[in-house]
Amino acid sequence: MKKSYLLFVTVLFFGIILSSCEKEELSGTVKYEVTCSPSGFNITYENSSGNTVQKTISSGSWTTTFTGNQGDFVYISAQADNENANITTEIYYQGDIIEQASSSGDYVIATASGSLL
């Protein structure tokens, strides 16, 4: 009986230790940012649900934020609507830039993607 009790306590102790060491899923703010000069561009991006969204933007900049989880795939692509354009896409996670792309020329595309770590 004493050995059974000791075995039970040992298994319980290690079970508690192992469950407290489980990796927590981290989440944080994801921000997509696009700037384009001259104004006007089209964007395609992956949102918080993992769906692809497309929009036409008439201004020179665009930003959106959502909550992302560690391991999520993030993606933003933008194409300028003009000749002699400069376009930049940036992805931030928890305030830190994780990916950036720029392009210059006629109707150029800049694409940034990555995984949240």
Image (cartoon, rainbow, N blue to C red):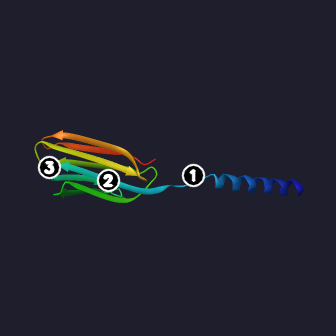
Q: Which amino acid type corresponds to the residue marked 2 in the rendered image?
A: Tyr
Q: CA distance from mark 3 to mark 1?
A: 46 Å
Residue at the (19%, 54%) spot, across then down: 60
Numbered label attached to residue 39: none
Give the label, 2 or 1, closer to the camera: 2
The residue where tag 3 is placed is: 38
Q: Please, what secondary structure does the residue beneath circle 2 have?
A: strand
Numbered label attached to residue 32: 2
In the rendered view, would you say 103 is above or below 54?
above
Q: In the orientation shown, which residue stands out farthest toward the right?
A: 2
How many neighbours does mark 1 have within 10 angstroms: few (below 14), some (14-19), or many (20 or more)? few
Quadrant position of the N terminus in the picture: bottom right
Residue at the (20%, 43%) spot, across then down: 109
The front one of 72 and 97 is 97
Could you say where residue 81 lies in the image, as x and y percent from the top left? Answer: 13, 49
Could you say where residue 106 lies in the image, as x and y percent from the top left? Answer: 12, 41
If you read the primary sequence from the N terminus, does the residue marked by circle 2 or circle 3 appear first?
Answer: 2
Q: Please, what secondary structure does the residue beneath circle 3 have?
A: loop
Residue at the (84%, 58%) spot, across then down: 5
Could you say where residue 88 lies in the image, as x and y percent from the top left? Answer: 25, 45
Give the label, 3 or 1, closer to the camera: 3
The residue where tag 1 is placed is: 23
Classify residue 24 by image quadrant: bottom right
Q: Which amino acid type corresponds to the residue marked 3 in the rendered image?
A: Pro
Q: CA distance from mark 2 to mark 1?
A: 27 Å
Q: Is residue 36 left or right of residue 50?
A: left
Q: Which amino acid type corresponds to the residue marked 1 in the rendered image?
A: Lys
Classify residue 8 by image quadrant: bottom right
The front one of 36 and 13 is 36
Could you say where residue 59 lies in the image, as x and y percent from the top left? Answer: 18, 57
Residue at the (21%, 40%) spot, across then down: 103
